[in-house]
Amino acid sequence: MNENQRVVKKITGKGKSINTLSFMFPVLSLLLTCCIDPFSPDVSEHVNLLTVDGSIIKGRETQSINITKSIAINESEFIAVENCRVKVVDDQGNEFLFEEGEKGVYTSKIDDEKLVINRSYRLIIETPKGERYESTPEIMHESPPIDTVYYYIEEDYSLNSNEEFSGLRFYIDLKAKEEGSRYFRWAIDETWQLRMPYKAEYAIIGDSQYIMPPHFDPFLNKEVPRRLVADPIIIKIDEPIHTCWKSQVFKGLFLENILNLSGNDKEKIPLHFVSGKSEKLRVKYSINVQQYALSEGVFNYWQQKKVELQESGGLYTTQPAQTISNIVNVNNPDETVLGYFWTSTKSEKRIYYDGPFENKIFYDCPKEELDTTPSAFPWGPSYPIYYYIENPYFDIKITALARCFDCRMHGGTLEKPEFWD
């Protein structure tokens, strides 16, 4: 076990946890009924507003600015604003132009050496209607190297299922320069390996139709017309389809400020929790943590986004409800603009967890013996039918549901990531 993998079993008595919750529920109910007033925002105030989501990150290959129009804060749609002129200007007068690819998405590949720490950058947008929007100058803070990322085996509790379960809680330690930023954000990309219980050797492919031309049929002793014939065929599986990889951006925001600390270090900052019941921990799991040093303004913006995330259930699933922004209409400063332009450098670190978690079996894949005819498939004519030869001397073919052979049916890809250890 390496220095990044600290595994400690945290033991919690079930009876004690349930009793604690039983005590807390009446108190929480009383607080909720007495102290919280419902808030219904004025939806009309946030309709058809310019919304900007963009940044300049040193260490990132492609920079991106998204420009849309809002509809209502409780809606998930974004209306792309096309054909804008977009550029970023630094405090030395250097300009970086952005080009539109996907509708409303403007990108630029900027050489990393041209992005300078402690230099300020300003976003400028000109719309097709002649409106000009500018951000306040944002200083590019240096993000220190990530010190340590690690995990503990911990217990969590589900109110829905009324049960405790184990999983991995990830943490990060922060060690920053005294004179550096005291506001930080972390983003997480996660990748995990899938491995199906059975490795397919053959597949029966159904509904493979071909055209039989007009011909003389000796059995019928007459000419027969052109017709379609369905004939399932057997193919050999040359490429393994039982092992896949899945990747996604973790939909969560992890923020920390260290204003009240004497130094610029902090240990055991909590990140995300992965349930031991998740498919992610069945074989092998990896996270890549990106660390960003922020200004106070952008930290407050992401704090607001974190509240929206908790209320809506997903990052960017709803329009922003508040108006924290550093972007203004030059000709109409009273116009409300949503979104934020920010800058930072990026440091990152990847760690792995080798499963399976607590040796649990997650798949329900009973084996069935398969005759030579597809009709013998125990779940009906669902093609393709995967199988392997268990005993070649007696021609015993073993099959199961297709999802027990083909990991692509679980959303995985057969291509192994370049970074995979």
Image: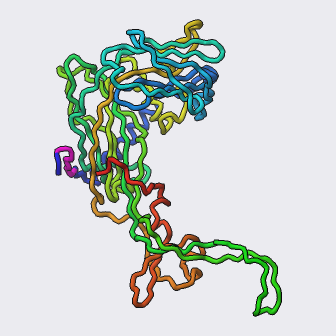
- Magenta part mainly helix, strand or loop? loop
Q: In the image, residue 84 lies at what x, y percent?
A: 59, 20
Is the image coloured rainbow, by chain, by secondary structure, or in one colour?
A: rainbow
Q: Is residue 289 left or right of residue 46?
A: left
Report the residue at 81% width, 79% height from top. Answer: 225
Q: Nearer the viewer, residue 278 or 164?
A: 278
Q: Is residue 266 above or below residue 281?
A: above
Q: Is residue 284 above or below residue 200?
A: above
Provide the residue span drawn in magenta: 3-9
Q: In the image, residue 261 lies at what x, y percent?
A: 20, 22
Q: Is residue 279 above or below residue 319?
A: below
Q: Nearer the viewer, residue 187 or 345?
A: 345
Report the residue at 77% width, 88% height from top. Answer: 217
Report the residue at 25% width, 45% height from top. Answer: 151
Q: Is residue 39 visible?
A: no
Report the residue at 39% width, 10% height from top. Answer: 91
Q: Nearer the viewer, residue 65 or 227?
A: 227
Q: Quadrant of residue 193?
A: bottom left
Is 47 inside the magenta-drawn segment? no
Q: In the image, residue 356 lies at what x, y percent?
A: 30, 60
Q: Quadrant of residue 127?
A: top right
Q: In the image, residue 172 lies at what x, y percent?
A: 25, 37
